[in-house]
Image (spheres, rainbow, N blue to C red):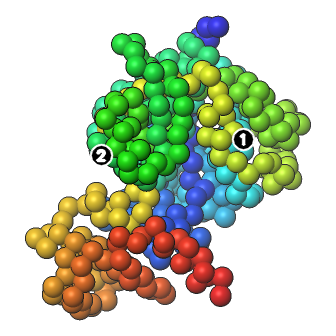
Amino acid sequence: MEVSQRSGYVVIMAGGVGSRFWPASTDEKPKQFLDILGVGKSLLRMTYERCLQFVDRDKIIVITNSRYFGLVKNEIPEIEDRQILLEPSRNNTAPCLAYACLRIRAMDENAVFAVLPSDHVILKEDQFAELMQKAVQYAASHEAIVTLGIKPTRPDTGYGYIQTIPSDRYPLAVKAFVEKPDKSTAESYLASGQYLWNAGIFIWSTQTLLEAFRKYEASIIDILNAQPGVYNTAGEQAYIDAVYPATKNISIDFAVLEKADNVFSIPADIGWSDLGTWASLFDYQQKDEEGNVIQGQGTVNTSEVNDSLIRIQGKKKAIIRGLNDYIVVDEEDALLIYPKRCEQDIKNAVNQLLSK
């Protein structure tokens, strides 16, 4: 079935907590609102500016938790209030995107929209914009769910993968979404040439996504669309506040993508990183002669420190000696000193600390 004359929107998901970046990222101010790269811009601001290369300013929507409205406005002061959708509860990405879809359909029933995480880095922005335009065009003319899949450069065990069906035609049909693999499995994925990293970048028409929800996770749409005329009206927020918390807590991957048979992927080489952890930030940043990454405005004197990430905020002075492969993050009211090789344990350690 052909679909035509659709216009493009972008939905930036900015409601996460980013707990693996504690203590810089907190529930009060998550990592998407931080200048985590030390470049003078937050990750959300960088994502917004990147979108302007392929979509009109008034077609960009940010969806976030209701407590972060002010943070979004601070990072993107030019965005209008109506372009910020507020979730009253954290119910994962499926309800989030169902809500965004219903709002966009109320504004433009023939719309296509792309979904982007707010906290990723893309170095090759021109190539990214070109691929996004191609993806929007494909989603506008086919009843297809399109994803940008990142060409893997190493057997990484920290990412989910997309298995594609080999073909000379693009986009490639998707055979399966697979969870984070172990090292040997990741090596086999890389060797096969059939797998891409799942970057969480999706493109679809409102019609295609709503049909997928109705087929695979109808309860979410039944709850959110019980009063379809409320979207894009003054009563929308009160309605969402009342019904949204009752939706199922489930990711878009589990709710739709892993079940759908009309998913396609465009392989992308765009200099992508999800910056999911301190170690991924360390890998991304330029190192000094000792292999260290040192951030912040503080004064740091190091001796016998190698392959470590050190982030000292404010005007604090620090002397550090004898660390190898460590993460040191000093914030105003919290301090993290942790072996980089054990960083996957940080989230659990933080949860234990904050529960006391």
Q: Residues within 10 Å of mark 2 (few under 14, many from 20)?
A: few
Front one among 90 and 107: 90
**Residue 193 pos. (x, y %):** 34, 30
For residue 305, what is the image quadrant?
bottom left
* Extreme residue in the front direction: 184
Mark 2 — residue? Answer: 154
Mark 1 — residue? Answer: 99
For residue 255, what is the image quadrant?
top right
Q: Are marks 2 and 1 in contact (CB under 8 Å)?
A: no
**Residue 278 pos. (x, y %):** 38, 67
Quadrant for the C terminus in the image: bottom right
Front one among 21 and 74: 21
* Residue 85 drawn above or below residue 222: below
Q: Which tag is nearer the camera, tag 2 or tag 1?
A: 2
Residue 248 in sight from this viewpoint: yes
Q: Residue at x 47, y 31 (%)?
A: 163
Check disc 1 and report its element: helix, strand or loop. helix
Quadrant for the N terminus in the image: top right
* Extreme residue in the left direction: 289
- CA distance separating discs 2 and 1: 36 Å
Q: Residue at x 45, y 21 (%)?
A: 165
For residue 327, what is the image quadrant?
bottom left
On screen, residue 44 versus residue 125, left or right, reads right
- What amino acid is at disc 2? Arg
Q: Residue at x 46, y 67 (%)?
A: 344
On screen, residue 321 versus residue 199, left or right, reads left
Front one among 86 and 306: 306
Q: Residue at x 85, y 41 (%)?
A: 223
